[in-house]
Image: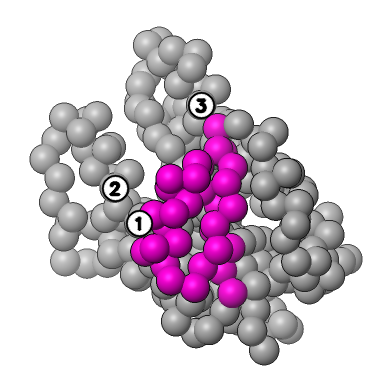
Amino acid sequence: MTQIHVLTGAGSGIGLAVARRLLDRGDRLIVVARDRRRASEVEAELPGSRAVVADLSRPEQIAAAVADLPGHVDSVIHAAGIVDLGEVADAPLLSWTDQLTVNLVAPAELTRVLLPSIRAARGQVLFINSGAGLTAHPGWGAYAASKHGLKALADALRGEEAPHGVRVTTVYPGRTATPMQARVHEQEGRDYDPGAFIDPESVADAVMTALTLPRDAVISDLTVRPGPR
């Protein structure tokens, strides 16, 4: 049976790889785009998808953006995120608020407004987190705080929604060859070699495994690390 998925971060990296997998198997895909121009670009890149407009840095836009979605949603997949490195002594307030808003508050709000539809489908909420959601390193305080918060959101949600038949999964990728990784290297002042990191398609494999697991089981937490070179 054709499934319906709502996906953030579909324009690049892991989100794009997952979006293509879902479309290739004939599912319906609803992507969240930050503005109408970006919505048109994503729909052109992902034929068959439908974009709704909501800027994740303004979570108050989310409820209206998804108000007319079907009452039966099989999964919401949170792949969007931003990163801005900086030590606690130097990171400005805006760096904290931006990352916490996009990486944590927006996923919480999108999940909240879609929960009735996810419950109706006995569906799944899947968070693409980060290794920074498990361990915080110097210079990564704000980003890691947002991702630790995302883990807490998933852990609480898992217990709350189990009685409704909703599965909750968190995937923790290590450093992956995405545009975000290129930005990280730019901030770190280092040369970027995509071949040194996990291919987004490998993380998409992990995501699809969690989504397609039979209903008698759930992958609650899945860590994906770079393999030996």
Q: Secondary structure at mark 2?
A: helix
Residue 88 or residue 49, whichever sits in front: 49
Type of amino acid under label 2: Pro
Look at the image and tell me whether residue 24 can be seen: yes
Q: Position of residue 225 (x, y in %)?
A: 35, 60
The residue carrying mark 2 is 179
Instruction: Tell me the residue at 65%/78% (across/down).
Output: 3
Residue at figure coordinates x 86%, y 66% from the top left:
164
Horizontal and vertical percent position of residue 36: 49, 45
Residue range corresponding to the magenta coloring:
28-57
Is residue 51 within the magenta segment? yes
Q: Which residue is mark 1?
A: 13
What amino acid is labelled 3 in the image?
Asp
Of the pair 55 and 191, the residue shown nearer to us: 55
Q: Residue furthest bottom?
A: 1
Left or right position of 215 against 95: right
User: Picture coordinates of residue 64 (x, y %)?
Assistant: 73, 44
**Does residue 78 appear anywhere in the picture?**
no
Residue type, numbered disc 1 = Gly
- Tell me if label 2 and label 1 are in contact, CB under 8 Å: yes
Q: Which residue is mark 3?
A: 98
In which image quadrant can residue 10 be found?
bottom left
